[in-house]
Image (cartoon, rainbow, N blue to C red):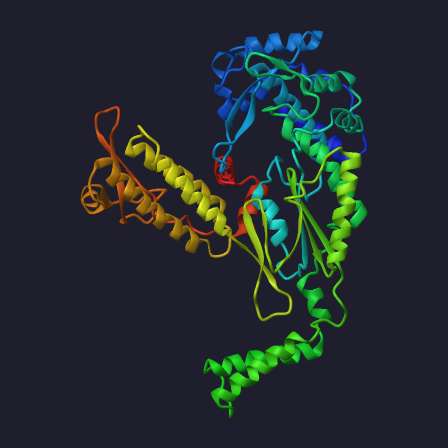
């Protein structure tokens, strides 16, 4: 039986009995074919080229090394090596640094094999409200859960963020949670070794008393297992995600007769104003009557019975939102305080007071870089729409300026960096409402920022630079229409031929959020496309 079949069998057993505790998992970890399968999973990752403190990377790994690693695991001689810690710049926060751990390649192999085993055990018990760092899930699937029922009214929103979540996970509590599903002591001891391996910084070893392994492949999964307790508590304590969304037929059966009459009259008056229906009413009389009926409809209940309260909970990693329908602000404050107390007592974590907010849907809220707000319509139940926040567009333009200000970089490399960044950003936001307007504005500003860069670098005016370095681009993946005038840069390839790089000028086509999320769930969308779009966030 090959590796995929064994993992599938383990997943079926875990799904059939969600309370079952599994043994003899460590024996599976010591098999060479699983280690080589793990190598195939990570060899194309960006970090696989970077060696740890042992000097190994994907170029000097082979089956012989896998056999040696399997023997060390079987004999118990294997010990995780402390990661090499470096400081990198924080995105969108100039001058600030964040730590990044670089584990050894052998530890990456073992962690990836561990991840495959743990995913088979825990994916069947994870809830659908969790979307971060899971197979066939992404930021778009989390947004789809919020937008899944646009007709459902949302009143209050609790925006939650756990302060320093990955660095403050309690090791003892995490191991106790793992013991509920795993009774293989050797596997639990190995996980504990990874948690306490520590890190090297400036040639000095530092212990890790809390948190998941820095830069470890297994870290996101361990965090999800830890935060799954929050998902369970919110659904059991507050009844989140338990009220089914009503079907159109169920909603139609509850609509009152008076409401139907008013809506029918409004529909007829609009047809009269468009000239499609004949009527003895003048245009002024029809407009006056329409405005009166719209105000009257707003005061009418559309259903024969009040809408039931509903709580929707969505989590992506350590960020979550709780959406409340037909519930007062006092209920939102009660849920927030109770949840905050439970998280601090049971998981030893703290909600960030600056990022954990209670907002009304008309004020809008941010989640995963998307903006959500109530769309002003003439209906009683406001529709929620997704938008590109203004701050996001401004941040992207600042990134464009930073790229164009880099010294000792050729025009060709600048255009390549701009195209890669802009395409990833547009892929991420192509599912929002009316994305082209914001995207075209950003691309237009980028065009002029690059124009200033070319004129400054060549010591000439923009008009003179445009005569030399503006041309019509051919059709390509970045410029699907082609034929548009844009900036270009020339470079010489290996054959001595001149090649041109054209600056992207057209936004990517809009796609439905539901189509993108469905493709991600079904695995039809290519992993590179999902990774590229989510990298923008």
Depth check: give the residue in front, 508 or 321: 321
Q: Residue at x 59, y 42 (%)?
A: 521
Counting from the top left corner in percent of width and height, residue 156 is at: 68, 56
Q: Residue at x 58, y 24 (%)?
A: 215
**Vertical comparison of 246 with 379: above or below:** above
Q: Residue at x 69, y 76 (%)?
A: 300
**Vertical comparison of 429 with 20: above or below:** below
Counting from the top left corner in percent of width and height, residue 85 is at: 56, 20
Q: Quadrant of the N terminus?
A: top right
424 vs 73, left or right, is left
Depth check: give the residue in front, 475 or 2: 475
482 vs 345, left or right, is left
Residue lying at the far bottom in this picture: please name it.
280
Q: How many marks?
A: 0
**Vertical comparison of 300 with 150: above or below:** below
Q: Residue at x 60, y 81 (%)?
A: 293
**Vertical comparison of 115 with 273: above or below:** above
Q: Is residue 232 visible?
A: yes
Determine the image quadrant of residue 71: top right
Counting from the top left corner in percent of width and height, residue 454 is at: 26, 39
Counting from the top left corner in percent of width and height, residue 500 is at: 26, 36
347 vs 113, left or right, is right
28 vs 60, left or right, is right
Determine the image quadrant of residue 318: top right
Q: Is residue 18 visible?
A: no
């Amino acid at each position: 039986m090959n590796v995929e079949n064994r993992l599938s069998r383990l997943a079926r057993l875990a799904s059939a009995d969600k309370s079952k505790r599994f043994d003899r998992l460590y024996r599976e970890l010591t098999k060479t074919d699983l280690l080589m399968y793990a190598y195939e999973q990570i060899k194309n990752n960006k970090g696989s080229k970077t060696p740890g403190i042992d000097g190994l990377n994907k170029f000097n790994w082979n089956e012989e090394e896998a056999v040696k690693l399997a023997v060390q695991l079987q004999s118990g001689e294997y010990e995780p090596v402390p990661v090499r810690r470096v400081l990198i710049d924080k995105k969108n926060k100039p001058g600030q640094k964040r730590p990044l751990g670089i584990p050894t390649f052998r530890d990456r192999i073992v962690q990836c094999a561990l991840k495959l085993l743990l995913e088979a055990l825990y994916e069947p018990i994870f809830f659908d409200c969790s979307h971060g760092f899971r197979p066939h899930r992404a930021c778009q699937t989390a947004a789809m859960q919020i937008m899944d029922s646009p007709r459902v009214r949302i009143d209050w929103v609790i925006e939650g963020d756990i302060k320093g979540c990955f660095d403050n996970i309690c090791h003892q509590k995490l191991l106790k949670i793992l013991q509920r599903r795993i009774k293989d002591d050797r596997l639990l001891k190995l996980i504990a070794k990874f948690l306490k391996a520590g890190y090297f910084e400036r040639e000095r070893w530092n212990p890790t008393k809390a948190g998941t392994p820095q830069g470890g492949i297994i870290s996101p999964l361990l965090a999800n297992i830890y935060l799954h307790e929050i998902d369970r508590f919110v659904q059991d304590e507050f009844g989140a995600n338990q009220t089914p969304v009503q079907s159109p037929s169920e909603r139609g059966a509850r609509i009152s007769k008076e409401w139907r009459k008013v809506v029918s009259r409004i529909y007829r008056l609009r047809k009269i104003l468009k000239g499609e229906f004949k009527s003895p009413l003048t245009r002024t009389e029809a407009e006056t009557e329409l405005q009166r009926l719209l105000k009257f409809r707003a005061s009418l209940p559309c259903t024969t019975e009040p809408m039931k309260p509903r709580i929707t909970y969505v989590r992506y990693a350590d960020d979550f939102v709780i959406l409340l329908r037909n519930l007062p602000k006092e209920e939102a404050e009660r849920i927030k305080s109770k949840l905050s107390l439970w998280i601090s007592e049971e998981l030893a974590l703290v909600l960030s007071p600056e990022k954990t907010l209670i907002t009304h849907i008309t004020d809008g809220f941010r989640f995963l870089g998307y903006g959500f707000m109530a769309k002003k319509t003439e209906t009683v139940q406001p529709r929620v729409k997704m938008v590109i926040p203004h701050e996001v567009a401004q941040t992207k333009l600042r990134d464009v300026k930073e790229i164009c200000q880099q010294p000792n970089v050729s025009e060709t490399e600048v255009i390549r960096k701009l195209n890669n960044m802009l395409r990833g950003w547009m892929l991420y936001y192509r599912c929002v409402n009316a994305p082209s307007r914001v995207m075209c504005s950003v691309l237009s500003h980028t065009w002029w920022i690059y124009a200033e860069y070319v004129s400054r670098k060549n010591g000439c005016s923009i008009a003179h630079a445009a005569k030399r370095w503006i041309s019509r681009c051919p059709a390509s993946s970045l410029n699907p229409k082609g034929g548009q005038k844009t900036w270009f840069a020339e470079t010489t390839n290996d054959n001595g031929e001149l090649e041109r790089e054209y600056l992207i000028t057209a936004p990517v086509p809009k796609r439905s959020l539901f189509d993108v999320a469905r493709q991600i769930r079904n695995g039809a969308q290519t992993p590179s496309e999902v990774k590229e779009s989510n990298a923008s966030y």
